[in-house]
Image (cartoon, coloured by chain):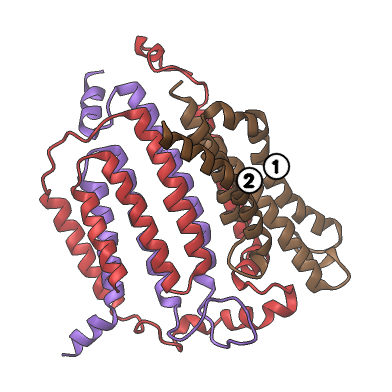
Chain colours: A brown, B red, C purple
Amino acid sequence: MSLDLILRIGTKLMLPFILLFAFYVQFHGDYGPGGGFQAGVIAAGTVILVAITFGLGAAQRIAPHGLVDRLIPLGLLIYAGTGVAGLLLGYNYLEYTGFSRTPAYGHEYGILIVEFGVLVTVSGTIIALFYAFAERSR
Amino acid sequence: MVLLTMLAVVTVAIARQRSLFAVVILASIYSFLMASVFLVLDAVDVAMTEAAVGAGVSTVILLATLHLIRTVEVRHLRPRLVPLAVTGVTGAMLIWGTLTLPPFGTADAPIHKHVVPRYLSESIRETNVANVVSAVLADYRGFDTLGEVTVIFTAGIGVILLLRGGRRRDRLADGDKTS
Amino acid sequence: MSTLKTLIEHYNYVVTIFLMMAGLYIVVARGNMVKKLIGLSVFQTSVFLLYIEPGKILGGTPPILDPAFSVYSNPLPHVLILTAIVVGVATLALGLALVVRINEAYGTVEEDEIFDGDGKA
Protein backbone atom coordinates (compact mmCIF):
# COMPACT_ATOMS: atom_id res chain seq x y z
CA MET A 1 0.00 0.00 0.00
CA SER A 2 2.70 2.48 -0.88
CA LEU A 3 0.22 4.88 -2.46
CA ASP A 4 -1.67 5.04 0.79
CA LEU A 5 1.56 5.85 2.61
CA ILE A 6 2.38 8.78 0.33
CA LEU A 7 -1.09 10.21 0.86
CA ARG A 8 -0.91 9.92 4.62
CA ILE A 9 2.53 11.43 5.00
CA GLY A 10 1.79 14.18 2.50
CA THR A 11 -1.42 15.07 4.32
CA LYS A 12 0.31 15.12 7.69
CA LEU A 13 2.94 17.50 6.32
CA MET A 14 0.43 19.81 4.68
CA LEU A 15 -2.21 20.13 7.38
CA PRO A 16 -0.62 22.87 9.51
CA PHE A 17 0.10 24.93 6.41
CA ILE A 18 -3.50 24.69 5.24
CA LEU A 19 -4.78 25.92 8.59
CA LEU A 20 -2.16 28.66 8.65
CA PHE A 21 -3.19 29.69 5.16
CA ALA A 22 -6.80 29.89 6.29
CA PHE A 23 -5.90 32.31 9.07
CA TYR A 24 -3.63 34.25 6.72
CA VAL A 25 -6.49 34.73 4.27
CA GLN A 26 -8.75 35.76 7.12
CA PHE A 27 -6.55 38.41 8.63
CA HIS A 28 -5.18 39.72 5.35
CA GLY A 29 -8.66 40.20 4.00
CA ASP A 30 -8.11 43.87 4.60
CA TYR A 31 -5.07 44.19 2.40
CA GLY A 32 -5.60 41.66 -0.33
CA PRO A 33 -8.22 39.26 -1.57
CA GLY A 34 -9.75 37.24 1.18
CA GLY A 35 -12.02 37.67 4.15
CA GLY A 36 -14.26 35.53 6.25
CA PHE A 37 -15.92 33.20 3.75
CA GLN A 38 -12.84 31.99 1.94
CA ALA A 39 -10.99 31.50 5.23
CA GLY A 40 -13.89 29.57 6.72
CA VAL A 41 -14.03 27.19 3.78
CA ILE A 42 -10.27 26.58 3.83
CA ALA A 43 -10.30 25.96 7.59
CA ALA A 44 -13.12 23.46 7.14
CA GLY A 45 -11.09 21.87 4.38
CA THR A 46 -8.45 20.94 6.95
CA VAL A 47 -10.87 18.79 8.93
CA ILE A 48 -12.39 17.31 5.77
CA LEU A 49 -8.92 16.35 4.54
CA VAL A 50 -8.22 14.58 7.81
CA ALA A 51 -11.54 12.77 7.54
CA ILE A 52 -10.86 11.66 3.97
CA THR A 53 -7.33 10.46 4.62
CA PHE A 54 -7.45 9.05 8.12
CA GLY A 55 -11.10 8.20 8.62
CA LEU A 56 -13.98 9.85 10.38
CA GLY A 57 -12.78 8.85 13.86
CA ALA A 58 -9.56 10.80 13.56
CA ALA A 59 -11.42 13.85 12.33
CA GLN A 60 -13.83 13.66 15.24
CA ARG A 61 -10.94 13.60 17.67
CA ILE A 62 -9.76 16.91 16.21
CA ALA A 63 -13.16 18.56 15.90
CA PRO A 64 -15.66 16.79 18.11
CA HIS A 65 -19.34 16.86 17.36
CA GLY A 66 -20.35 18.99 20.30
CA LEU A 67 -17.75 21.63 19.51
CA VAL A 68 -18.82 21.92 15.89
CA ASP A 69 -22.48 22.11 16.85
CA ARG A 70 -21.72 24.98 19.16
CA LEU A 71 -19.54 26.82 16.68
CA ILE A 72 -22.37 27.41 14.24
CA PRO A 73 -24.47 29.76 16.36
CA LEU A 74 -21.38 31.23 18.02
CA GLY A 75 -20.32 33.05 14.86
CA LEU A 76 -23.77 34.50 14.37
CA LEU A 77 -23.74 35.60 17.99
CA ILE A 78 -20.40 37.35 17.49
CA TYR A 79 -21.75 39.18 14.46
CA ALA A 80 -25.02 40.27 16.02
CA GLY A 81 -23.24 41.00 19.27
CA THR A 82 -20.94 43.44 17.53
CA GLY A 83 -24.00 45.25 16.30
CA VAL A 84 -25.45 45.40 19.78
CA ALA A 85 -22.11 46.64 21.10
CA GLY A 86 -22.37 49.47 18.62
CA LEU A 87 -25.85 50.20 20.00
CA LEU A 88 -24.61 50.20 23.60
CA LEU A 89 -21.87 52.68 22.80
CA GLY A 90 -24.45 55.18 21.66
CA TYR A 91 -24.37 54.77 17.88
CA ASN A 92 -26.65 52.98 15.44
CA TYR A 93 -26.86 49.20 15.22
CA LEU A 94 -23.79 47.73 13.50
CA GLU A 95 -22.00 51.05 13.41
CA TYR A 96 -18.40 50.59 14.39
CA THR A 97 -17.48 54.20 15.04
CA GLY A 98 -17.28 53.83 18.79
CA PHE A 99 -14.70 51.06 18.98
CA SER A 100 -11.65 53.27 19.11
CA ARG A 101 -10.66 56.93 19.52
CA THR A 102 -10.31 57.44 15.77
CA PRO A 103 -13.42 56.47 13.79
CA ALA A 104 -11.27 54.96 11.06
CA TYR A 105 -9.58 52.50 13.41
CA GLY A 106 -12.92 51.80 15.01
CA HIS A 107 -14.28 50.72 11.64
CA GLU A 108 -11.27 48.54 11.03
CA TYR A 109 -11.60 46.74 14.36
CA GLY A 110 -15.28 46.27 13.75
CA ILE A 111 -14.61 44.73 10.35
CA LEU A 112 -12.02 42.36 11.83
CA ILE A 113 -14.36 41.15 14.57
CA VAL A 114 -17.26 40.70 12.20
CA GLU A 115 -15.19 38.74 9.70
CA PHE A 116 -14.02 36.49 12.53
CA GLY A 117 -17.64 35.78 13.35
CA VAL A 118 -18.24 34.86 9.71
CA LEU A 119 -15.21 32.53 9.76
CA VAL A 120 -16.49 30.68 12.81
CA THR A 121 -19.97 30.13 11.42
CA VAL A 122 -18.90 29.16 7.91
CA SER A 123 -16.27 26.65 9.03
CA GLY A 124 -18.60 25.19 11.64
CA THR A 125 -21.40 24.78 9.12
CA ILE A 126 -19.27 23.10 6.48
CA ILE A 127 -17.73 20.67 8.96
CA ALA A 128 -21.20 19.88 10.34
CA LEU A 129 -22.50 19.32 6.80
CA PHE A 130 -19.70 16.90 6.10
CA TYR A 131 -20.23 15.03 9.36
CA ALA A 132 -23.97 14.75 8.69
CA PHE A 133 -23.39 13.26 5.24
CA ALA A 134 -20.59 10.99 6.33
CA GLU A 135 -22.33 9.57 9.35
CA ARG A 136 -25.49 8.69 7.51
CA SER A 137 -24.00 5.58 6.05
CA ARG A 138 -22.68 4.12 9.26
CA MET B 1 -13.00 34.17 -24.56
CA VAL B 2 -11.41 30.75 -24.83
CA LEU B 3 -12.37 30.04 -21.23
CA LEU B 4 -15.97 30.88 -21.94
CA THR B 5 -16.07 28.49 -24.87
CA MET B 6 -14.58 25.75 -22.70
CA LEU B 7 -17.31 26.44 -20.15
CA ALA B 8 -19.97 25.99 -22.81
CA VAL B 9 -18.44 22.68 -23.89
CA VAL B 10 -18.33 21.40 -20.31
CA THR B 11 -21.96 22.32 -19.77
CA VAL B 12 -23.10 20.44 -22.85
CA ALA B 13 -21.09 17.46 -21.64
CA ILE B 14 -22.86 17.60 -18.28
CA ALA B 15 -26.20 17.50 -20.01
CA ARG B 16 -25.32 14.51 -22.12
CA GLN B 17 -23.44 12.34 -19.61
CA ARG B 18 -25.12 9.37 -18.03
CA SER B 19 -22.69 8.34 -15.34
CA LEU B 20 -23.32 10.44 -12.24
CA PHE B 21 -19.72 10.25 -11.09
CA ALA B 22 -18.57 11.77 -14.39
CA VAL B 23 -21.17 14.49 -13.99
CA VAL B 24 -19.82 15.40 -10.55
CA ILE B 25 -16.26 15.63 -11.84
CA LEU B 26 -17.45 17.73 -14.76
CA ALA B 27 -19.24 20.04 -12.34
CA SER B 28 -15.99 20.46 -10.43
CA ILE B 29 -14.17 21.31 -13.67
CA TYR B 30 -16.92 23.79 -14.46
CA SER B 31 -16.45 25.52 -11.09
CA PHE B 32 -12.72 25.69 -11.62
CA LEU B 33 -13.11 27.22 -15.08
CA MET B 34 -15.62 29.69 -13.70
CA ALA B 35 -13.12 30.73 -11.02
CA SER B 36 -10.54 31.34 -13.76
CA VAL B 37 -13.02 33.46 -15.71
CA PHE B 38 -13.73 35.49 -12.58
CA LEU B 39 -10.00 36.05 -12.17
CA VAL B 40 -9.69 37.33 -15.73
CA LEU B 41 -12.61 39.68 -15.02
CA ASP B 42 -10.67 41.23 -12.08
CA ALA B 43 -12.97 39.73 -9.46
CA VAL B 44 -10.31 38.27 -7.17
CA ASP B 45 -12.41 37.77 -4.03
CA VAL B 46 -15.17 36.14 -6.01
CA ALA B 47 -12.68 33.89 -7.79
CA MET B 48 -11.20 32.70 -4.51
CA THR B 49 -14.63 32.03 -3.03
CA GLU B 50 -15.89 30.24 -6.12
CA ALA B 51 -12.78 28.06 -6.28
CA ALA B 52 -12.95 27.17 -2.60
CA VAL B 53 -16.70 26.68 -2.46
CA GLY B 54 -17.56 25.38 -5.90
CA ALA B 55 -14.62 23.17 -6.64
CA GLY B 56 -14.04 22.22 -3.02
CA VAL B 57 -17.05 21.95 -0.75
CA SER B 58 -19.59 21.39 -3.49
CA THR B 59 -17.67 18.47 -4.95
CA VAL B 60 -17.11 16.87 -1.54
CA ILE B 61 -20.80 17.05 -0.66
CA LEU B 62 -21.81 15.71 -4.08
CA LEU B 63 -19.42 12.79 -3.76
CA ALA B 64 -20.73 12.06 -0.26
CA THR B 65 -24.27 12.05 -1.68
CA LEU B 66 -23.26 9.69 -4.47
CA HIS B 67 -21.77 7.35 -1.91
CA LEU B 68 -25.07 7.31 -0.07
CA ILE B 69 -27.21 6.88 -3.18
CA ARG B 70 -25.12 4.59 -5.34
CA THR B 71 -26.87 4.86 -8.65
CA VAL B 72 -25.82 5.58 -12.14
CA GLU B 73 -28.40 7.28 -14.29
CA VAL B 74 -29.95 4.41 -16.18
CA ARG B 75 -32.51 6.36 -18.11
CA HIS B 76 -32.01 6.52 -21.82
CA LEU B 77 -31.28 10.14 -22.62
CA ARG B 78 -33.13 11.62 -25.50
CA PRO B 79 -33.34 15.32 -26.33
CA ARG B 80 -36.76 16.52 -25.37
CA LEU B 81 -38.34 18.95 -27.78
CA VAL B 82 -40.57 21.10 -25.60
CA PRO B 83 -37.88 22.05 -23.05
CA LEU B 84 -35.44 22.62 -25.88
CA ALA B 85 -37.90 24.97 -27.62
CA VAL B 86 -38.71 26.82 -24.40
CA THR B 87 -35.08 27.35 -23.49
CA GLY B 88 -34.29 28.37 -27.07
CA VAL B 89 -36.99 31.01 -27.13
CA THR B 90 -36.05 32.32 -23.67
CA GLY B 91 -32.40 32.42 -24.64
CA ALA B 92 -33.13 34.36 -27.80
CA MET B 93 -35.19 36.91 -25.89
CA LEU B 94 -32.49 37.31 -23.25
CA ILE B 95 -29.75 37.74 -25.84
CA TRP B 96 -31.85 40.36 -27.61
CA GLY B 97 -32.21 42.10 -24.24
CA THR B 98 -28.53 42.09 -23.42
CA LEU B 99 -27.62 43.58 -26.77
CA THR B 100 -28.58 46.98 -25.42
CA LEU B 101 -25.97 46.76 -22.67
CA PRO B 102 -22.81 48.83 -23.17
CA PRO B 103 -19.99 46.97 -24.90
CA PHE B 104 -17.72 44.90 -22.72
CA GLY B 105 -15.29 46.86 -20.60
CA THR B 106 -16.21 50.47 -21.23
CA ALA B 107 -15.36 52.87 -18.44
CA ASP B 108 -18.31 55.22 -18.70
CA ALA B 109 -21.13 52.72 -18.29
CA PRO B 110 -23.90 53.90 -15.94
CA ILE B 111 -23.11 51.36 -13.24
CA HIS B 112 -19.79 53.01 -12.51
CA LYS B 113 -21.42 56.33 -11.79
CA HIS B 114 -23.66 56.34 -8.76
CA VAL B 115 -22.36 54.93 -5.49
CA VAL B 116 -19.09 53.30 -6.49
CA PRO B 117 -16.90 56.42 -6.86
CA ARG B 118 -17.78 57.27 -3.27
CA TYR B 119 -16.86 53.80 -2.07
CA LEU B 120 -13.59 53.86 -3.97
CA SER B 121 -12.51 57.26 -2.75
CA GLU B 122 -13.82 57.32 0.81
CA SER B 123 -13.10 53.74 1.84
CA ILE B 124 -9.51 54.25 2.93
CA ARG B 125 -10.33 57.41 4.84
CA GLU B 126 -13.36 56.07 6.66
CA THR B 127 -12.33 52.51 7.33
CA ASN B 128 -8.56 52.26 6.83
CA VAL B 129 -9.01 49.07 4.87
CA ALA B 130 -7.48 48.69 1.42
CA ASN B 131 -9.67 45.89 0.10
CA VAL B 132 -12.78 47.74 -1.00
CA VAL B 133 -14.80 44.56 -1.31
CA SER B 134 -14.18 43.63 2.33
CA ALA B 135 -14.96 47.16 3.47
CA VAL B 136 -18.23 47.27 1.56
CA LEU B 137 -19.16 43.75 2.64
CA ALA B 138 -18.57 44.19 6.35
CA ASP B 139 -19.11 47.89 6.90
CA TYR B 140 -21.13 49.73 4.27
CA ARG B 141 -23.42 46.77 3.59
CA GLY B 142 -23.10 45.03 6.93
CA PHE B 143 -26.79 44.14 7.20
CA ASP B 144 -26.63 42.05 4.03
CA THR B 145 -23.77 40.05 5.48
CA LEU B 146 -25.70 39.55 8.71
CA GLY B 147 -28.56 38.11 6.67
CA GLU B 148 -26.16 35.89 4.80
CA VAL B 149 -24.61 34.46 7.97
CA THR B 150 -28.15 33.74 9.13
CA VAL B 151 -28.83 31.85 5.90
CA ILE B 152 -25.69 29.75 6.33
CA PHE B 153 -26.65 29.06 9.92
CA THR B 154 -30.14 28.00 8.85
CA ALA B 155 -28.80 25.71 6.15
CA GLY B 156 -26.45 24.06 8.64
CA ILE B 157 -29.23 23.50 11.14
CA GLY B 158 -31.49 22.20 8.37
CA VAL B 159 -29.01 19.63 7.15
CA ILE B 160 -28.28 18.51 10.68
CA LEU B 161 -31.98 18.03 11.33
CA LEU B 162 -32.48 16.12 8.11
CA LEU B 163 -29.50 13.84 8.27
CA ARG B 164 -28.45 13.51 11.88
CA GLY B 165 -29.60 10.45 13.64
CA GLY B 166 -27.22 8.00 12.08
CA ARG B 167 -29.81 5.51 10.96
CA ARG B 168 -28.48 2.55 9.15
CA ARG B 169 -29.97 1.96 5.76
CA ASP B 170 -30.87 -1.65 6.44
CA ARG B 171 -32.80 -0.65 9.52
CA LEU B 172 -34.86 1.66 7.37
CA ALA B 173 -35.83 -1.22 5.14
CA ASP B 174 -38.65 -2.29 7.42
CA GLY B 175 -40.58 0.82 6.61
CA ASP B 176 -39.64 3.08 9.47
CA LYS B 177 -39.73 6.53 7.93
CA THR B 178 -39.74 8.73 11.01
CA SER B 179 -36.62 9.90 12.72
CA MET C 1 -22.45 44.26 -40.57
CA SER C 2 -23.19 46.32 -37.52
CA THR C 3 -25.19 43.46 -35.99
CA LEU C 4 -22.14 41.25 -36.40
CA LYS C 5 -19.99 43.88 -34.72
CA THR C 6 -22.49 44.20 -31.88
CA LEU C 7 -22.56 40.43 -31.52
CA ILE C 8 -18.78 40.25 -31.27
CA GLU C 9 -18.70 43.02 -28.68
CA HIS C 10 -21.37 41.19 -26.72
CA TYR C 11 -19.93 37.70 -27.28
CA ASN C 12 -19.43 37.13 -23.59
CA TYR C 13 -23.06 37.96 -22.84
CA VAL C 14 -24.14 35.54 -25.55
CA VAL C 15 -22.09 32.73 -24.04
CA THR C 16 -23.37 33.55 -20.55
CA ILE C 17 -26.97 33.33 -21.75
CA PHE C 18 -26.11 30.04 -23.45
CA LEU C 19 -24.74 28.67 -20.18
CA MET C 20 -27.83 29.86 -18.38
CA MET C 21 -30.14 28.18 -20.84
CA ALA C 22 -28.10 24.97 -20.78
CA GLY C 23 -28.42 24.89 -16.99
CA LEU C 24 -32.16 25.50 -17.27
CA TYR C 25 -32.48 22.71 -19.82
CA ILE C 26 -30.70 20.30 -17.49
CA VAL C 27 -33.10 21.18 -14.68
CA VAL C 28 -36.20 20.80 -16.79
CA ALA C 29 -35.40 17.95 -19.10
CA ARG C 30 -33.46 15.43 -17.01
CA GLY C 31 -35.17 13.22 -14.52
CA ASN C 32 -32.37 12.33 -12.14
CA MET C 33 -32.51 14.54 -9.06
CA VAL C 34 -28.79 14.87 -8.51
CA LYS C 35 -28.37 15.98 -12.10
CA LYS C 36 -31.14 18.51 -11.66
CA LEU C 37 -29.35 19.97 -8.67
CA ILE C 38 -26.10 20.18 -10.61
CA GLY C 39 -27.97 21.91 -13.44
CA LEU C 40 -29.34 24.39 -10.91
CA SER C 41 -25.82 25.08 -9.70
CA VAL C 42 -24.68 25.63 -13.30
CA PHE C 43 -27.56 28.07 -13.78
CA GLN C 44 -26.66 29.96 -10.59
CA THR C 45 -23.01 30.30 -11.51
CA SER C 46 -23.82 31.61 -14.96
CA VAL C 47 -26.05 34.27 -13.38
CA PHE C 48 -23.09 35.31 -11.23
CA LEU C 49 -21.05 35.63 -14.41
CA LEU C 50 -23.78 37.79 -15.91
CA TYR C 51 -23.53 40.15 -12.94
CA ILE C 52 -19.76 40.44 -12.87
CA GLU C 53 -19.18 40.98 -16.56
CA PRO C 54 -20.43 44.59 -16.76
CA GLY C 55 -18.24 45.54 -13.82
CA LYS C 56 -15.00 44.98 -15.57
CA ILE C 57 -13.20 47.98 -17.01
CA LEU C 58 -10.63 47.22 -19.68
CA GLY C 59 -7.33 48.49 -18.33
CA GLY C 60 -8.50 48.55 -14.72
CA THR C 61 -7.19 46.52 -11.83
CA PRO C 62 -8.91 44.50 -9.11
CA PRO C 63 -10.56 46.80 -6.59
CA ILE C 64 -7.82 46.80 -3.94
CA LEU C 65 -6.73 50.34 -3.27
CA ASP C 66 -3.10 51.05 -4.01
CA PRO C 67 -1.36 54.35 -4.71
CA ALA C 68 0.10 53.04 -7.95
CA PHE C 69 -3.21 52.50 -9.72
CA SER C 70 -6.10 54.80 -10.41
CA VAL C 71 -8.68 52.88 -12.42
CA TYR C 72 -10.40 50.07 -10.55
CA SER C 73 -13.00 47.59 -11.64
CA ASN C 74 -16.36 48.00 -10.01
CA PRO C 75 -16.42 46.36 -6.55
CA LEU C 76 -20.15 46.43 -6.00
CA PRO C 77 -21.12 43.32 -8.01
CA HIS C 78 -18.31 41.41 -6.27
CA VAL C 79 -19.92 42.01 -2.89
CA LEU C 80 -23.35 40.84 -4.02
CA ILE C 81 -22.01 37.78 -5.78
CA LEU C 82 -19.84 36.81 -2.78
CA THR C 83 -23.00 36.53 -0.71
CA ALA C 84 -24.81 34.72 -3.48
CA ILE C 85 -22.12 32.06 -3.91
CA VAL C 86 -22.21 31.03 -0.28
CA VAL C 87 -26.02 31.01 -0.24
CA GLY C 88 -25.88 28.84 -3.37
CA VAL C 89 -23.74 26.20 -1.74
CA ALA C 90 -26.00 26.25 1.31
CA THR C 91 -29.05 25.50 -0.83
CA LEU C 92 -27.14 22.82 -2.73
CA ALA C 93 -26.28 21.09 0.53
CA LEU C 94 -29.88 21.26 1.74
CA GLY C 95 -31.14 19.94 -1.60
CA LEU C 96 -28.71 17.03 -1.50
CA ALA C 97 -29.76 16.20 2.06
CA LEU C 98 -33.35 16.05 0.83
CA VAL C 99 -32.29 13.81 -2.07
CA VAL C 100 -30.61 11.41 0.37
CA ARG C 101 -33.78 11.20 2.45
CA ILE C 102 -35.95 10.72 -0.65
CA ASN C 103 -33.67 7.92 -1.74
CA GLU C 104 -34.04 6.23 1.59
CA ALA C 105 -37.81 6.55 1.47
CA TYR C 106 -38.47 5.59 -2.15
CA GLY C 107 -35.39 3.64 -3.13
CA THR C 108 -34.65 5.72 -6.21
CA VAL C 109 -33.77 9.22 -7.32
CA GLU C 110 -35.37 9.19 -10.75
CA GLU C 111 -38.24 11.62 -10.88
CA ASP C 112 -40.83 9.54 -12.75
CA GLU C 113 -40.20 6.46 -10.64
CA ILE C 114 -40.87 8.59 -7.57
CA PHE C 115 -44.11 9.85 -9.07
CA ASP C 116 -45.14 6.27 -9.86
CA GLY C 117 -44.35 5.27 -6.30
CA ASP C 118 -46.45 8.13 -5.03
CA GLY C 119 -49.33 7.16 -7.31
CA LYS C 120 -49.42 3.62 -6.00
CA ALA C 121 -49.02 4.52 -2.32
User: Quick one: quadrant of the N terminus of chain A?
Assistant: top left
Q: Quadrant of residue A126?
A: top right
Q: Is residue A43 above or below residue B108?
A: above
- Residue at image location 39% in from the left, 17% down from the top: B169
Report crowding for label 1: few under 14, some 14 to 19, many 20 or more residues within 10 A (C-alpha). Answer: some
Whether residue B171 is visible to the viewer of this picture, yes or no, is yes
The answer to whether dots 1 and 2 both sit on one chain is: yes
Residue that numbered label 1 is attached to: A74
Question: Tags 1 and 2 in contact by the CB under 8 Å rule?
Answer: yes
Measuring from the top left, give residue B41's x and y in whole percent.
43, 74
Q: What separation in Å lies between label 1 and label 2 (alpha carbons)?
A: 7 Å
* In-image side of A80 versus B159 (left or right): right
Mark toward the start of the polypeptide (1 vs 2):
1
Kind of residue at badge 2: Thr
Circle 1 sits in a helix, a strand or a loop, which is it?
Answer: helix
Figure disc tally = 2
Residue B39 lies in quadrant: bottom left
Closest to the observer, B129 or A97: B129
Residue C14 shows which numbered tag? none
Q: Position of residue C70 (x, y in %)?
A: 58, 88
User: Which residue is identified by label 2?
Assistant: A121
The residue depicted at 60 percent of the width and 47 percent of the height is A43
**Residue type, mark 1 in image:** Leu
Q: Chain of mark 2?
A: A
Tell whether B126 sits left or right of C63. right
Q: Is residue C53 left or right of residue C115?
A: right
Name the image quarter holding residue C105: top left
Residue B32 lies, with reference to residue C105, above or below; the image says below
